[in-house]
Amino acid sequence: MKRLLLCGSLGALSLCLGDLRAQTGEPPPLPPGPLLQKMADYSAMKITYSYPQEQEKAIATDKSPPGPTLFSLTPIRQLTLTRTKPIWHAVRVDVYGNNLGQWYDGHNSYCEVVGISEPAVNNPAQGQTYSAGMPDLNQTDFPDMGWISPQTYTGVETMVGHKCLVFKKNDMTAWIDLESRLPVQWQRGKETRTFQQLPPPTALLALPPKIAAFAAIIYRNDHKWDKFRPAAGR
């Protein structure tokens, strides 16, 4: 009987605490585990972007869409991320169908555009920036999610069939799958991004020949004075 009374008391206490949180606007306790999981060593993800109706209409009726550029500011439609550690490949397709590819070899990021012959390099150590919509693969696996933290957690919701942790900051909201801790949806104002896991790659990615040659030149330039430096500990 005492055990039943104790269980009943604990249940009532739990309900009271839940009611109190609801009344004060306090979110439920943050479940244990990482807030946002990194992509697995061999994995792939597709991110699809949609925009407010009036912006989508303007894009559809644009009679002189811009062509490809290395540092495009045109709205992105789809970003596909493929990882075979340490190599990443990201493909950015804008709303006009222009393709911007990004390769990361663990040291530098190399951008290539269909229709432009020479790749461009981003060296994060030198403070160089990334093209619009491209992830900074030194900081986070997913663009615009570096702000996710216990302080921005607001609760648990179901989004497109997934039970999700919800994070909010200013006008941004992110839904992170409770089980996998990978993103499900991201929203800022009326811009929405949906995330879809793709079948993982089965073989190590290789840099395209032109970018591999470019990377080799940069590596040689970065290390040409190494033989003249004193050995560590001397």
Image (tube, helix red, strand yellow):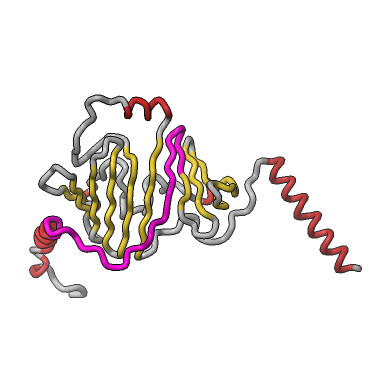
Q: Image point 86% across, 65% down: which residue?
A: 4
Examine the image and state in which quarter residue 44 appears. bottom left
Q: Is residue 228 left or right of residue 108?
A: left
Q: How many marks?
A: 0
Residue 163 position (above or below residue 71): below
Quadrant (top left/top right/bottom left/bottom right) for the C terminus: bottom left
Quadrant (top left/top right/bottom left/bottom right) for the N terminus: bottom right
Residue 222 position (above or below residue 135): below
Asked whether residue 100 appears in the rendered view, the answer is: yes
Residue 76, given in percent of the width and then of the height, sits at 32, 39
Residue toward you, 11 or 67: 67
Magenta stretch in the rendered image: 186-212
Residue 72, given in percent of the width and then of the height, sits at 24, 37
Examine the image and state in which quarter residue 223 appears. bottom left
Which residue is farthest right?
1
Q: Is residue 127 left or right of residue 196?
A: left
Q: Image point 59% across, 47% down: which residue?
A: 157
Examine the image and state in which quarter residue 6 appears. bottom right
Residue 174, given in percent of the width and then of the height, sits at 48, 45
Residue 125, given in percent of the width and then of the height, sits at 23, 53
Queried whether the magenta region covers residue 114, the answer comes back as no
Residue toward you, 88 or 219: 88
Residue toward you, 134 or 107: 134
Q: Image point 53% across, 61% down: which residue?
A: 33
Queried whether the magenta region covers residue 200, the answer comes back as yes
Q: Is residue 183 left or right of residue 83?
A: right
Q: Image point 58% across, 48% down: which residue?
A: 158
Asked whether residue 222 appears in the rendered view, the answer is: no
